[in-house]
Amino acid sequence: MTPKSAETQSKPDLSKAIKAKLPATLGPQLASLASAPPRGGDWIVEMKLDGYRILARVEDGVARLLTRRGHDWTDKMKSLAVAIQNLGIRNGWFDGEIVVMNSRGLPDFNALQNSIGNRRNESIVYFMFDAPFYGGLDLRKVPLWSRRAVLKEMLEEQDDHRVRFAQSFDAEPAQVLEAARQMAMEGVIAKRRDAPYVSGRTETWLKLKCTLQQEFVICGFTCRSGTKREVGGLLIAYHHEGQLVYAGSVGTGWDSKTGQALLAQLLKLEVGDPPLDPRRSRLVDGRGARRGRSAG
């Protein structure tokens, strides 16, 4: 399976582009959850990255970073905004996902959470996958493959590793989904090649999740970076041959208030020794791991 090249084999079709002023706001296009990969049709398939959806608005060369709900996160990621500005873009709206990659080159959501708002967050990478507006043109009615061709050409002229083009793959959605499962990725996004950009949830963008599941129990926790008043990560384990085997840390799915409530609850369960099989498990105390009785 290789990155898809068919998107740029033809000159982009911009016949439906419209000259327009840059709008102040823009709602993102959202994918509908599908129970199975689509059969037939012409689809562009991308990996589903485990990060935060971010829209970048550039006006007169100044970039702002906004969440899918319109919250301005520019101050939380000033260096990333500067990286986008250094691309030399004058005006445009761009859609993508911010992630932090781990040592295996895979997105690490917990690391991303710890990076946002920190002074040193140069590890955050922005994968752009769409360009609804660019160069004084409204491209929303332009087919997806043409918007992506324009975006790819724009990004090929820069060498900042923090702003990258989100590659697609030259394979059927089912094949890419299986590859994502083997790589322990979250899933894939399948998009109709000729789809316009429509704010809101559509059937032309489909979200396909990997279905491999495992039941875990909570065996400990860590506090969030910079504070000891809330849980930052839950240490989880799985049952194997009558023992609990450490599986890693989960640090997503709750806000600050919930993190404080979790801490109050888990402190009551704290014990001196972790309830884990020492032959197959290792907790690094130097990272602030706290042990607790296992809880499902």
Image (cartoon, rainbow, N blue to C red):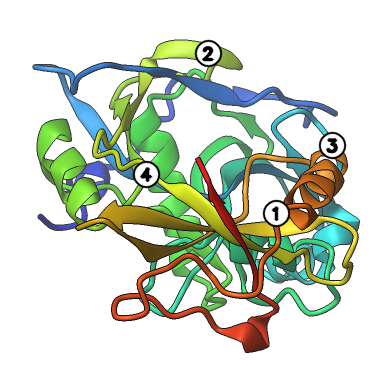
In the displayed structure image, the side of residue 252 where residue 38 appears, left or right = left
Q: Position of residue 110 (x, y in %)?
A: 60, 60
The residue positioned 18% from the left and 23% from the top of the image is: 37
Q: Give the alpha-carbon distance from disc 1 to disc 4, as whole Å.
A: 31 Å
Residue 13 shows up from this direction: no
The image quadrant of residue 112 is: bottom right
SS label for mark 1: loop
Residue 18 shows up from this direction: yes
The type of residue carrying mark 1 is Leu
Q: Give the alpha-carbon distance from disc 1 to disc 3, as whole Å.
A: 37 Å
Of mark 2 and mark 4, the one earlier in the sequence is 4
Mark 1 surroundings within 10 Å by alpha-carbon count, few (fewer than 14), some (14 through 19), many (20 or more): some
Tell which tag, 1 or 4, sits nearer the viewer: 1
Disc assigned to residue 201: 2
Q: Give the alpha-carbon distance from disc 4 to disc 3, as whole Å.
A: 25 Å
In depth, the one of 157 and 56 nearer the eye is 56
SS label for mark 4: loop
Q: Is residue 288 above or below residue 171?
A: below
Tell which tag, 4 or 3, sits nearer the viewer: 4
Of mark 1 and mark 3, the one earlier in the sequence is 3
Q: Position of residue 182 (x, y in %)?
A: 18, 54
Of mark 1 and mark 2, the one earlier in the sequence is 2
The image quadrant of residue 190 is: top left
Of mark 4 and mark 3, the one earlier in the sequence is 3
The type of residue carrying mark 4 is Glu
Q: Position of residue 56 (x, y in %)?
A: 70, 46
- The residue where tag 3 is placed is 71
